[in-house]
Amino acid sequence: MQAGDWAFVLDNVDYLLTGAGVTVGLTLAALAVGFLLGFPAGAIEVYGDGLLERVVSTAGVLLRGTPIVVIMLMLFFVVSISQSAFVTAAVGLGLRSAAYQSQIFRGALQSVDEGQLEAARAVGMSRFEAIRHVVVPQALRRSMPGFQNEFTIVLKDTSIAFAIGLAELLTRGYDLFTQSGRSTAVLEVFLVISAMYFVLTFATNRGLDRLADYYAIPSGEER
């Protein structure tokens, strides 16, 4: 490691921080898409039947079994859903996240005792009202650990947007050490990028830990 290479990286930290901002924005957008599609999909797999349930289940299997880079390339170069690499990456990551989030929420919904649903029906609630007001609030709380893991995975998977030219953190790091005469700064650039990913991952995990503790379902056991 050379002092000149470290000086070069430090002089361009603001450039990398801008890429980190894109990474955070892309993560949040993808998770939002994933939640908006994944939660209903999980509910359909638990409470639905017939054609709709089979379509949702099959779509989830296909998305989980397809590499995210293939999804992004298909959306950008084949389907061309948008000329914006950010929008395409957000949709691609969101669709794949939805497939995994659906399983997180499916498990959380199934973990709520069936007796609670029956009790809600017994006091006059419709099936939909019982699911909405009794099952869903508990399921969302119980899904926090799984969602936390998904958040970390999506955050790291944003680096794959490199494949469609989005200038997120990894792409900007690559741009730095491929500059003329800067090939010796590869290690320094990747150490700084790795540190940024670690800080983002650590901070979001600690924040979600606190959120999970705050919304934990009270019980007789130690929380």
Image: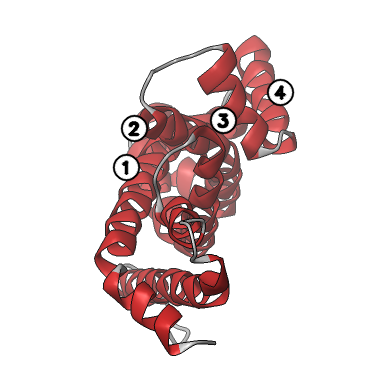
Labelled pair 4, 3 in contact (Cβ < 8 Å) = no
Q: Mark 3 or mark 2, which is nearer to you? A: 3
Whether 11 is drawn above or below 173: the answer is below
Q: Amino acid at mark 3?
A: Met
Q: Position of residue 122 (x, y in %)?
A: 41, 38
Q: Amino acid at mark 1?
A: His
Disc 4: which residue? 58
Q: Amino acid at mark 2?
A: Glu
In the image: residue 113, left or right of residue 215: right
The residues tagged by marks 1 and 3 sit, at their Cα atoms, a distance apart of: 37 Å
Labelled pair 2, 4 in contact (Cβ < 8 Å) = no
The local crowd at label 2, few if under 14, some if 14 to 19, many if 20 or more residues have their Cα within 10 Å, is some
Disc 1: which residue? 133
Is any atom of residue 43 visible in this view? no
Q: Earlier in the sequence, mark 4 or mark 3?
A: 4
The residues tagged by marks 4 and 3 sit, at their Cα atoms, a distance apart of: 20 Å
Labelled pair 1, 2 in contact (Cβ < 8 Å) = yes
Residue 129: assigned label: 2
Q: Position of residue 181 (x, y in %)?
A: 49, 64
The residues tagged by marks 4 and 1 sit, at their Cα atoms, a distance apart of: 28 Å
Residue pictured at 46% horizontal, 56% vertical: 179
The residues tagged by marks 1 and 2 sit, at their Cα atoms, a distance apart of: 6 Å
Taking depth in this image into account, of 54 and 181 the one nearest to the observer is 181
